[in-house]
Image (cartoon, rainbow, N blue to C red):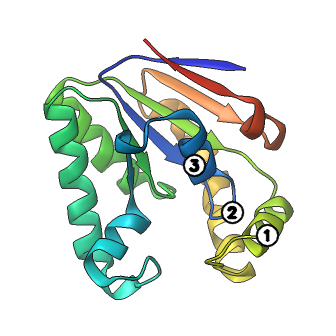
Amino acid sequence: MRVMVPEPSLVILCGPAGSGKSTFAVRNFPETAVVSSDRCRAMIADDEASLRVSRDAFALFHEIIELRLRHRRLTVADSTALHPDARRALRTIARRSGAPVTAVVFDVPEATCRLWDARRERKVGTAVIRRQWEMLQDALRRIPGEGYEQTVILSEADVAKTRVEVA
């Protein structure tokens, strides 16, 4: 599968931990285009898992995204983006810059997320994945009506074989 995204634009990756978002981002986008909420946590607290700095990490996450879009750069938001308010905040930032928004949703089975999580260096565990996977089901119902210029739903098989082309 090929996905075309314009430059500049905002690409929002949405899915549970272990669904392949960060791997997909590394494979399909320049490193400088990807803004990771985990990386923002690490920049503040030297620990990607530090939830105590989440508020500051997301302030930084949003600020970097806004600055990149203001400078008309392709920007990829790498977070779970499972809560409607999280997606709304990202769309608002993009709209201020006049950038189109693509949602890429990782519709991967819960069991696969658990398996892929077990292989990661920083594991979140079964309970977190279960909760996030349930949130994904709600996101899959809501996202088609949220006003994206493009919505891409990736199955487990699609995650590895989909390629993004920037136009």
Of helix, strand and loop, which one carries label 2?
loop
Give x and y (percent) for residue 6. 39, 16
> What residue would you read off at disc 1?
114
Give x and y (percent) for residue 108. 76, 50
Give x and y (percent) for residue 159. 73, 39
- Asked which quadrant contains residue 39, the reply is bottom left
Left or right of residue 166, residue 152 in this image: right
Report the Cα–Cα distance between label 2 and label 3: 17 Å
Left or right of residue 16, residue 82 in this image: left
Instruction: Classify 118 as above or below 75.
Output: below
Q: Local crowd at mark 3 within 10 Å, few (<14), some, or many (≥20)?
A: many
Indicate which disc, 3 or 1, sits on the residue closer to the N terminus: 1
Nearer to us in this view, 118 or 27 = 27
Of helix, strand and loop, which one carries label 1?
helix
The residue that appears at 33% across and 76% down in the rendered structure is 54
Nearer to us in this view, 56 or 135 = 56
Q: Amino acid at mark 1?
A: Arg
* Quadrant showing the N terminus: top right
The residue that appears at 30% across and 83% down in the rendered structure is 45
Q: Is there any visible trace of residue 141 in the rendered image? A: no
Which disc number belongs to residue 139?
3
Q: Are marks 1 and 2 in contact (CB under 8 Å)?
A: yes
Point out the frontmost of discs 3 and 1: 1
* Quadrant showing the C terminus: top left
Indicate which disc, 1 or 2, sits on the residue closer to the N terminus: 2
> What residue would you read off at disc 2?
18
Q: Are marks 3 and 1 in contact (CB under 8 Å)?
A: no
Report the Cα–Cα distance between label 3 and label 1: 19 Å
Q: Local crowd at mark 2 within 10 Å, few (<14), some, or many (≥20)?
A: many
